[in-house]
Amino acid sequence: MRFRSTGYTPLMLIAQTCALLGFACYAVVLTPLQEEWHLSNLQSGLIASAFFFGYMLAVPLATALTDRVDARKVYLVGGLSATSGLLGMSLFANNFWTALFFMAINGAGLAGTYMPGLKILSDRIQSGELTRHIAFYTAFFGIGTGFSYLCSGWILSALGWHYVFGMIALGPFTAFLIVFLLIPPLDQDKWKGPIKIRLQDIFPVDKWRLVLQNKKASGFIFGYTAHSLELFASRSWIVAFFAFCAAASGESFFLAATTLAGVINFFGVPSSILGNEIALRVGRQKWVCIVMLTSAVMGIALASSTGHSWWLIVALAIGHAIFIMADSATLTAGLVINAQENIKGAAMGLHSLMGFGGGLMGPAIFGFVLDIAGSRSSQIAWVWAYVAVVIWGVLFVIYERRNGWVDKTNS
C-alpha cells in the first residue's frame, strides 16, 4: 500500500499513540505498588525515572542510526523493546530493583520510536509546511499519554496492576505492525552497504558541540530540558496528587483519578498545536518564555489548591496541562528548523537526550522533595514538590533573556 508523502502523517500519529500507551502505566499503579512493595516516595520516583534513564541510554544510538539507515528499521526495534519491557513488568517485576530494570527497557523502546518516528516523517514529507506536521506529531504525545492513563486506569480497576502492563503491551506491538506493514522502506543510495557505527557516532560530541554553538538551536534544547522536567514529573505524580486532594477535601471527584488524569492530558493536544501557530506569529522564543512563566504559576496554584472544591482543582490542573504543553511543539520545531541540515539527526538526538534527561530528573526530584518536606500526606510537601520542578522553567527564562536569545527574530 502506497501513500502520498503527507499521507504518512496520519499513520505515524496512530502508531505514536499506540507506542505511548505504556507511558503512564506506572503512574497509574504507583500508589498500589508503593503499598505492596513498601516503597518510599523517592523509590517510587526513581522507578518512574528509570523509564527516562532507559530512554537516555538508548536514544543516542537510536538517533545515530537514523543518519545511517532508514529510521523505519530503528522504529521496529523500538516497538519490540517497549513491548518486552511492559511484558517484563507484568510477568517478572516483584520489587524495586526488578521494576527499575523493566521500566528502563520500556523507556529504551520509546527511544526507538519517538524521535525515529519524527525522522520517518521528515525523510518522507517533501511538500507543505514541515513544522505543522511536527506540531501534530509532538502534540499527539498528549493523545498517547492520555489514552495511557485511561486504559491503564480501567484495567487496574477491573483486573489489577499485573494486567495493566500485560494488556498495554499490545500498544507498542500494534505500533510495530503499523510501521512494518504500512510504511514502505526508503530506497536511497546513501544507506547501501555495511552499517558502521562507532562510539563517536553514538555520542557525536563534535556534532553536539556544533549544535550548541548555534545559539538559537541550543536555546530550544535547554528549553526542552526544563519543559520535560516539569512535564514528566507532573505526569508521573498527578494520579497520586488527585488521590491526596480527594482525601484532603473529603469530597469525591466526579471521575476516577486515573480517568481524570487521562482526560486532562488531552487538553495538551490542541494546546501544543495552537501554541505552535501563535509562536509563528509572535516569535518562538518569546512564546516559549511566556508559556514557561505561566506554567510555573499554574503549577504552584494547583499544588496550593488541595483541600478546596474538586472543580477548582480540576480547573487548575487543566490550566497547568495546557501551559505545560503550549510550547512543546514550538521547542521541537524550533530545533528542527534551526539545526544545520548535515547534523540534523545529531541535533534531534541531543534534543531528545537532554529533554528526557529532564524527564529522568523530574519524577525523582518530585518524590525526594515529598519525602523531605513531609511525605505524601502533607499539603505543604506537595507545594514544595511542585515548586521544585517548575522553578527550572523560570530559571531558563531568566538566563535566556539575559543571554539575548529572546530578542532574536521569529525563527
Image (spheres, rainbow, N blue to C red):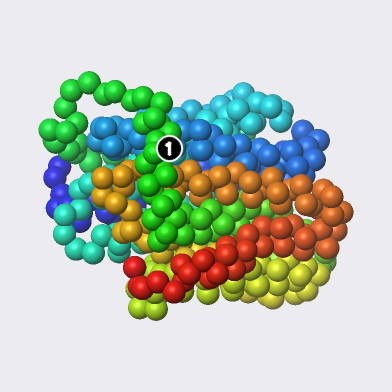
Across and down, in percent, residue 201 comes to: 36, 31
Secondary structure under tag 1 reads: helix
Residue at x-position 87% and y-position 54%: 374
Q: Residue at x 65, y 72 (%)?
A: 297
Up the image or down, 94 lies above or below 308; here it is: above
Q: Which quadrant, please, contains the N terminus? A: top left
What residue sits right under mark 1 in the picture?
205
Amino acid identity at mark 1: Val
User: Residue at image x 52%, y 30%?
Assistant: 105
Query: Pointer 1: residues within 10 angstroms few (<14), some, or many (20+)?
Result: some
Q: Position of residue 240 (x, y in %)?
A: 71, 53
Q: Nearer the viewer, residue 367 or 223?
A: 223
User: Where on the picture, by quarter, is residue 158?
Assistant: top right
Viewed as shown, does residue 228 lie left or right of 17?
A: right
> Quick check: can you spot residue 120?
yes
Q: How many marks?
A: 1
Q: Residue furthest bottom?
A: 282
Give residue 184's position: percent from left, percent from top.
Answer: 19, 38
Residue at the image point whose x is 35% and y is 73% from the top: 410
In the image shown, does 251 or 372 lie closer to the viewer? 372
Indicate the quadrant where residue 115 lies.
Answer: top left
Residue 251 visible from this viewpoint:
no
Q: In the image, 237: left or right of 251?
A: left
* Image quadrant containing the C terminus: bottom left
User: Which of 404/376 is in front?
Assistant: 404
